[in-house]
Image (spheres, rainbow, N blue to C red):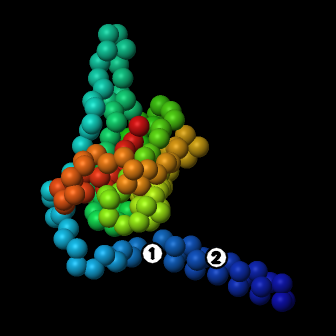
Amino acid sequence: MKTQNLKLSLLFAMLFGLLAGCASTQPSDEAGDVATVPDETVETGVVDDGGVSGDTYEDPALSADTVFYFDFDKSVLKPEATAALRIHAESLRNNPRAIRLEGHADERGTREYNMALGERRANAVKEFLMLEGVNGSYIDVISYGEERPAALDSNESAWSLNRRVELN
């Protein structure tokens, strides 16, 4: 009887833990009163588009280096990023290949914090791709933090370009 109760309690605890882990929460902005860029000014875009080459067709979603941008101090995917990632996930499910996700941050924050933030961002992209059915063993995650900025100025416009994950 005790064993059965213990098993039942453990089952409920695991179920509760699973449900709690799936609960969606709104991330907090720990930065205080720092100016942020409105969502509509930061976009997801293709850095380099593939295409038809001779007799061989290359899927643009597989051959393109793609950049996904994030809000200040956040590692939550934006809706436009998830739409683009669904296309990548479908291509990667149909044609598996190794990819690298490079996480980046702007220059604000300590070096260690920005390395961790870049990793959280890259892992957010990896987790989304895996939820869409991509084999995680093909995905390599690396964080460069603030070390490889896309823009060198110290203003919101440059910082918004540096808060990104590049899919290579």
Task: Give percent across and percent down for residue 90.
Answer: 41, 40
Q: Mark 2: which amino acid?
A: Met
Task: Tell me if residue 49 can be seen.
Answer: yes
What residue do we see at 46% from left, 34% from top?
A: 94
> Local crowd at mark 1 within 10 Å, few (<14), some, or many (≥20)?
few
Task: Give percent across and percent down for residue 97.
Answer: 50, 33
Per the image, the residue denoted by label 2 is: 14
Q: Is residue 79 above or below residue 18?
A: above
Quarter of the figure with residue 67: top left
Q: Split into 4 quadrants, where in the image is the C terminus?
A: top left
Q: Is residue 45 above or below residue 94?
A: below
| Disc number placed over residue 164 in the picture, else none | none
Per the image, the residue denoted by label 1 is: 23
Task: Give percent across and percent down for residue 31.
Answer: 31, 76
Task: Give percent across and percent down for residue 102.
Answer: 43, 46
Q: Mark 1: which amino acid?
A: Ala
Answer with mark 1 or mark 2, whichever residue precedes in sequence: 2
Q: Is residue 136 rendered to the left or right of residue 32?
A: right
Q: Is residue 14 rendered to the left or right of residue 36?
A: right
Task: Tell me if residue 81 can be seen.
Answer: no
